[in-house]
Amino acid sequence: MAKILLVDDERDILETLPEVLKKWGHETFVAPNGFEALKVFQSNSVDFIITDIKMPQMDGLELLQKIQEIDKHCMVIFLTGYPSLDSAISAMRSGAYDYLVKPVNLEELKLRIERGLERKEHIKSLPLLRGLNWALLVSIPLWLLLGIILAKLLKTR
């Protein structure tokens, strides 16, 4: 279904969560920190990133900023073992798709991933819909003009 990059400095998460994601049909990549995650992201097509917020060297918010410089439409879910209103607000204002607290409820994570993938598909289809809208806006006056001309031609006969 999707290519998901899992970023966390906790070994337990990196060992268990990829297996769950694979069972759900997703291809997974793992990275123990933000720097490795950027390398994986740049060399692979990634649809979704699930990342810890608090990590040494490069935290999740900084990783999100660097990811958005490359791909503004990549969905990012933050995980945290240290939830706070401030970190949730910062995450969402920075452009994260969602924010979950550890230990992660797997059914909730699955639902959030599915909804995020649906949202990503909608975002991808927006330029096409905008193009169709412009085509309709341009073509309607042309058809009206042709109708008027045709009506005048038929009227003069």
Image (spheres, helix red, strand yellow):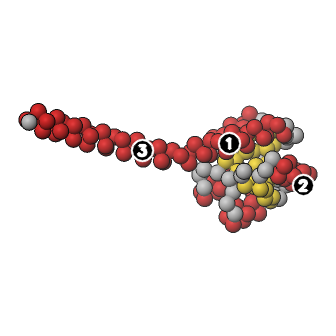
153 or 130, nearer to the observer: 153
Pointer 3 residue: 132
Q: Give percent across and percent down for residue 140.
A: 30, 39
Three-letter residue code for mark 3: Leu
SS for callout 3: helix
Q: Give percent across and percent down for residue 97.
A: 67, 42
Mark 2 and mark 3: span between their CA atoms? 46 Å
Q: Give percent across and percent down for residue 16.
A: 90, 51
Q: Is residue 145 left or right of residue 54?
A: left
Pointer 2 residue: 15
Q: Looking at the figure, which quarter contains the C terminus?
A: top left
**How packed is label 2: few (under 14 Cα within 10 Å), some, or many (20 or more)?**
few
Residue 118 appears in which quarter of the rendering?
top right
Looking at marks 1 and 3 on the same chain, the residue that comes earlier in the sequence is marked by 1
Mark 1 and mark 3: span between their CA atoms? 25 Å
Q: Is residue 12 left or right of residue 116?
A: right
- Residue 116 numbered tag: 1
Residue in the picture at 84% in, 40% down: 106
Instruction: Report the number of numbered marks.
Output: 3
Looking at marks 2 and 3 on the same chain, the residue that comes earlier in the sequence is marked by 2
Contact, CB < 8 Å: mark 1 with mark 2? no
Looking at this rendering, what residue extends furthest in the front direction? 157
Residue in the picture at 40% in, 41% down: 133
Do we see residue 10 in this rendering?
no
Mark 1 and mark 2: span between their CA atoms? 23 Å
